[in-house]
Image: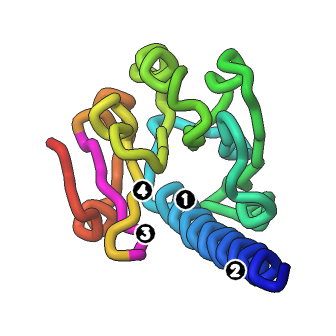
């Protein structure tokens, strides 16, 4: 009986460590999202808010909420969580959750010509046409950029951002 209790303790401890690592990972990713928005210029955008939409399950938890009402130039960030594809056209930035992987390619095809910064954090995202994809490399969050897709969307990414990317697709 003692052995079973010990196994349960190890299992719970491992799950707790994994959750803590994931929370830290998404804390870093939330900071990256903010900086991606800071270093992006949308063509002729004059609205008061920049809608940052999370499409699918929100793994950020409250970390992304820290961006609510933060300023970028003359604009304030507004966080929108949605599972509704139609709402994405009102977004300036869309983060595609891993849970939305099934819909990913079809949604990106429709958004491709819109002035929307698309972000994700899953392996094939860049190949499907997302503008910026975050990946883990040696337990660090790094990012890759699809500059071709950014240009199709009419977005201008700052050279500083391009220099920090681990991969840039032209």
Secondary structure, mark 1, is helix
Q: Quadrant of residue 30?
A: bottom right
The answer to which of marks 1 and 2 sits earlier in the sequence is 2
Mark 1 vs mark 3, CA separation in Å: 12 Å
Quadrant, the N terminus:
bottom right
Residue at horizontal 23%, vertical 36%?
Answer: 148
Residue under numbered circle 1: 33
Residue designated by label 3: 141
Tag in front: 1 or 2: 2
Asked if residue 62 lies left or right of residue 141, the reply is right
Mark 3 / mark 2, whichever is N-terminal: 2
Residue 56 coordinates in the image, percent (x, y)? 67, 35
Q: Are marks 3 and 4 in contact (CB under 8 Å)?
A: yes
Mark 3 vs mark 4: which is more N-terminal? 4
Quadrant assignment, res 21: bottom right
Q: Nearer the viewer, mark 1 or mark 3?
A: 3
Q: Look at the image and tell me whether residue 41 can be seen.
A: yes
| Residue drawn where x is 56% and y is 38% of the image | 96
Tell me the residue that label 4 is attached to. 134
Location of residue 166 in the rendering, given as x and y in whole percent from the top left corner: 24, 64
Gap in Å between the C-alphas at discs 1 and 2?
34 Å
Q: Which is closer to the viewer, label 4 or label 2?
A: 2
> Cα distance, mark 3 to mark 2?
27 Å
- Marks 4 and 2, how far apart in space? 31 Å
Which region is colored magenta? 139-147
> Percent position (x, y) of residue 163?
23, 68
Task: Please tell me how crowded label 1 is: few (under 14), some (14-19), or many (20+) other residues with Cα within 10 Å.
Answer: many
């Amino acid at each position: 009986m003692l052995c079973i209790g010990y196994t349960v303790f190890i299992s719970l401890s491992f799950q707790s460590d994994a959750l803590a690592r994931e929370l830290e990972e998404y804390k870093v990713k939330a900071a990256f999202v903010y900086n991606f928005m800071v270093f992006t210029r949308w063509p002729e955008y004059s609205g008061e808010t920049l809608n940052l939409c999370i499409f699918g399950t929100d793994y950020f938890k409250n970390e992304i909420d820290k961006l609510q009402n933060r300023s970028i130039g003359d604009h304030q960030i507004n966080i929108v969580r949605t599972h509704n594809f139609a709402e994405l056209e009102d977004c300036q930035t869309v983060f595609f959750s891993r849970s939305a992987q099934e819909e990913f390619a079809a949604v990106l095809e429709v958004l491709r010509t819109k002035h929307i910064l698309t972000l994700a954090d899953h392996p094939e995202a860049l190949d499907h046409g997302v503008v910026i994809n975050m990946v883990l490399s040696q337990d660090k969050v790094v990012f890759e950029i699809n500059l071709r897709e950014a240009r199709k969307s009419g977005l201008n990414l700052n050279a500083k951002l391009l220099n920090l990317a681990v991969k840039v697709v032209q």
